[in-house]
Amino acid sequence: MASTLYVDRPSPVHRLNPVTKLVALLTLIVVTFAIPYWWVAAFGVVAVVLPAAIISGCGGRLFKLGGAILLPIILVLFIVQGLTFPGGRTPVFQWGFITVTVEGLQFALGIGSRIICLVLASLLFVLTTHPGDLLSELTARGMSPKFSYVISSTLQLIPAFRDRADGILLAQQARGLAVGGGVRGRIKAMMPLLTPLVLGMFTDVEERATAMEARGFGSGARRTVLTPVRDTRAERIARWVMPAIAAAAIAAPVVMGAM
């Protein structure tokens, strides 16, 4: 199995500089959470994330992963906020002691739209950005190699965790572990996996730390990039414009509230 969610495609989105995509992601998140309207997050998904996913050729993979992550979160969010929102005054549905309010659903819509935008944009960044390119580019721009490694390694955390869990499960099944019997049986089968999975992750951290030291991550010497990452003038300009947009989004509610 692959140790990263990155999907290799010859698309314009993949060819963008990793730092440009990182700045775009952070800008979208700041704008979405700074302006308190659900339609801002919806616009970010429809106007930014969806076109980029289609252009990159990762739309199917994005919505498969996004659906698996978001469906239970959004479902629980609407149920809980619809039923328990403290400012709820206008009932939409009532059955016995259960009352779903308009205010609760509106609050859930605002939070849910932001979560959807955050998750889909982050997944798209992971799917279209190779961790090695991100590490090289961040290091080339003067960031500490250790800190750059921490950022790039987060792109590989979930696949590595999944691969290790699958390997342990196969090994346990080869030794006679029964998997099945409904939800209860699956939960029971998960218990023998927890100890080797947690201990294995600690061992993996130690091995990575040793490998980092062996490759001179602690050295203060200036490094050269083996494979330069593409960077255009338009992208450099965009990296200045996007933070300005994020700053304007933060300032706009404050200015509007003072008027």
Image (cartoon, grey):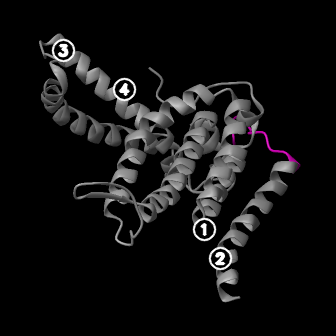
Considering only vertical position in the picture, is 135 above or below 87?
above
Front: mark 3 or 1: 1
Q: Is residue 223 visible?
A: no
Is 146 left or right of 45, judged from the image as shown? left
Task: Report, in whole angstroms, how far the alpha carbon at label 4 lies from the one at label 3.
Answer: 15 Å
Helix, strand or loop under label 4: helix
Badge 2 vs badge 1, beta-carbon distance below 8 Å: yes
Mark 1 and mark 4 residues within 8 Å of each other at the beta carbon:
no
Q: Nearer the viewer, mark 1 or mark 4?
A: 1
Q: Please report whichever mark, 2 or 3, sits nearer to the chain's N-terminal start.
A: 3
Q: Is residue 86 above or below residue 26?
A: below
- Judged from the image, the secondary structure of the residue bearing numbered disc 1 is helix
| Quadrant of the rendered image containing residue 170 | top left
Residue at label 4?
163
Q: CA distance from mark 2 to mark 1?
A: 8 Å
Residue at screen point 15% across, 18% down:
181
Q: Earlier in the sequence, mark 2 or mark 1?
A: 1
Q: Amino acid at mark 3?
A: Gln
Pointer 3: residues within 10 angstroms few (<14), some, or many (20+)? few
Compare residues 240 and 83 and report the one nearer the observer: 83
Q: Mark 4: give few (<14), some (14-19) or many (20+) Cα within 10 Å.
A: some
Range shown magenta = 224-233
Q: Position of residue 154 (x, y in %)?
A: 47, 44
